[in-house]
Amino acid sequence: MIPHLPLANLSLWVTPLWMLALGVAIGAAILFILWAILWLINRKAASSAIRLVQESVLGPISYVVLAYLAILVVATPVVETDQIFQSLKRLGSVGEDVVNLRVPERTVDFAGQIVVGSDEVVGCDITCGRDR
């Protein structure tokens, strides 16, 4: 019997593969644009470049690129792309946050609230200014 895998787990292991496929797609798009510019300038050199890809080790590599492009297309509905791109926007603002929380004197079981994006936290350090 095959265990039930929720879609959240599927998204968890497909996301890194999708990101790799996205990088391969961007690289392939850049190479295609460069080839198109070459085709506009010198069509004979562009056809020679196609032959070079077909007749060398670049031929099988191009099949791998096509496989990654297929993975990109198939996995896009499963991957939470909006969260990935929001995370990339926050990448430049990575740093340390200091939150000061004042605990009233002689308080037992003080409940303070600190809002944190828990999936992005690397570490947490709680310090006290005084011993009581």
Image (tube, rainbow, N blue to C red):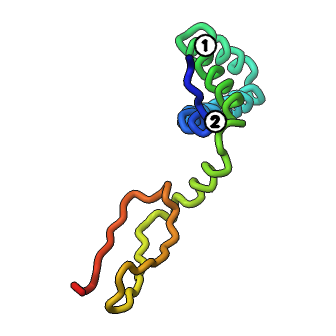
Figure quadrant of residue 11 = top right
Please say if 84 is above or below 20. Answer: below
Q: Nearer the viewer, residue 87 or 54?
A: 87
Q: Nearer the viewer, mark 1 or mark 2?
A: 2
Report if residue 23 is visible in the image: no
Q: Nearer the viewer, residue 104 or 24?
A: 104
Quadrant containing the N terminus in the rendered view: top right
Spatial CA span between label 1 and label 2: 43 Å
Pointer 2 residue: 7
Tell me where residue 15 sits by quadrant.
Answer: top right
Residue at the image position 71 percent from the left and 30 percent from the top = 73
The reply, left or right, for residue 21 in relation to residue 132 is: right
Q: Earlier in the sequence, mark 1 or mark 2?
A: 2
Depth check, front residue: 44 or 6: 6
Q: Is residue 3 above or below residue 6?
A: above
Q: Which residue is mark 1?
A: 52
Residue drawn at (38%, 78%) of the image = 109
Element under disc 2: helix
